[in-house]
Amino acid sequence: MQNFDYTGKDNLDVMSFAKNYNNFLVSLVNTHAPQSGDILDFGAGTGFFAERLAKDARSVLCVEPDAQQIEEIANKGFKTFSDTNELADACIDFAYSLNVLEHIEDDVEAMREIYRVLKPGQCCVIYVPAMPSLYSSMDEKVQHFRRYTKNELSSKLSKTGFELIECRYADILGVFATWAYKLFGSKSGDVSVSGLVAYDRFAFPLSKTMDIVTQRVAGKNVFAVARKPC
């Protein structure tokens, strides 16, 4: 990951108010993460998820290229790295990356780095924005190079050498909310805290239930669980 200054930190801070959404992401990672060992948070931001996933028997290592944010993470007591090239081959027991790869122009190279540092037989969880047609001013503000399709994410992970365990869409109601934002929302890319909280409280729980039916077809996000072969 190249060093850069992240311009969307205000939107990142706003997302901390989305309690149901964040709990879903923590649960998604915890479902696949081991109870012990070294876990890599690839693109850790402010350490929001690292704080929630760190346990007594877990060591969460944070990779974050933004200088201001890596200082914030270090102040929380986490071992930090500005780039994965500071990590040895096959030293990580599990990795996750939540809404990060879309910020990286060469995302396949980033996947290769996650693959390199994982121990053989170990897994990663990748969660990213989905559906290119939803690309909006918010994506532009937070420096997204792309939004993914399920086929694109699974294909790139396979190209990197991963064995795909699962790949599916998430948050079907978010598709309609994002379309509405794209058509009628702020052209500056700002996120309304009140609108976000209302969606998170009332729509997101229903959206999770509906995903059981729609997960193969569409969603605001897409995630994959992949394993490095032994």
Image (spheres, rainbow, N blue to C red):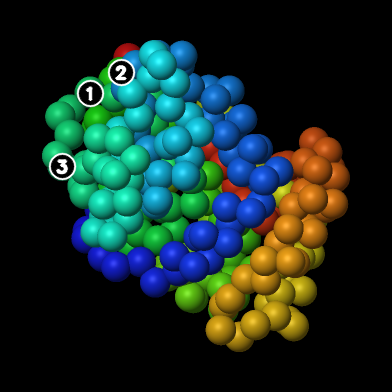
When the figure is inspected, residue 37 is found, relative to residue 20, above or below; the finding is above
Secondary structure beneath dot 2 equals strand
Instruction: Work out whether residue 198 or residue 166 is closer to the camera in this orientation and state it.
Output: 198
| Amino acid type at mark 1 | Ala
Mark closer to the chain start, 3 or 1 = 3
* Pointers 2 and 1 in contact (C-beta within 8 Å): yes
* Pointers 3 and 1 in contact (C-beta within 8 Å): no
Instruction: Work out whether residue 149 or residue 79 is closer to the camera in this orientation and state it.
Output: 79
Secondary structure beneath dot 3 equals helix
| Amino acid type at mark 3 | Asn
* Pointers 2 and 3 in contact (C-beta within 8 Å): no
Label 3 sits on residue: 85
Q: Residue at x 58, y 52 (%)?
A: 16
Residue 79, image x, y percentages: 25, 35
- The part of the image, by quadrant, that contains residue 20 is top right
Secondary structure beneath dot 1 equals loop
Q: Quadrant of the C terminus?
A: top left
**On residue 90, which mark appears?**
1
| Amino acid type at mark 2 | Pro
- The part of the image, by quadrant, that contains residue 77 is top left
When the figure is inspected, residue 109 is found, relative to residue 157, above or below; the finding is below
**On residue 217, which mark appears?**
none
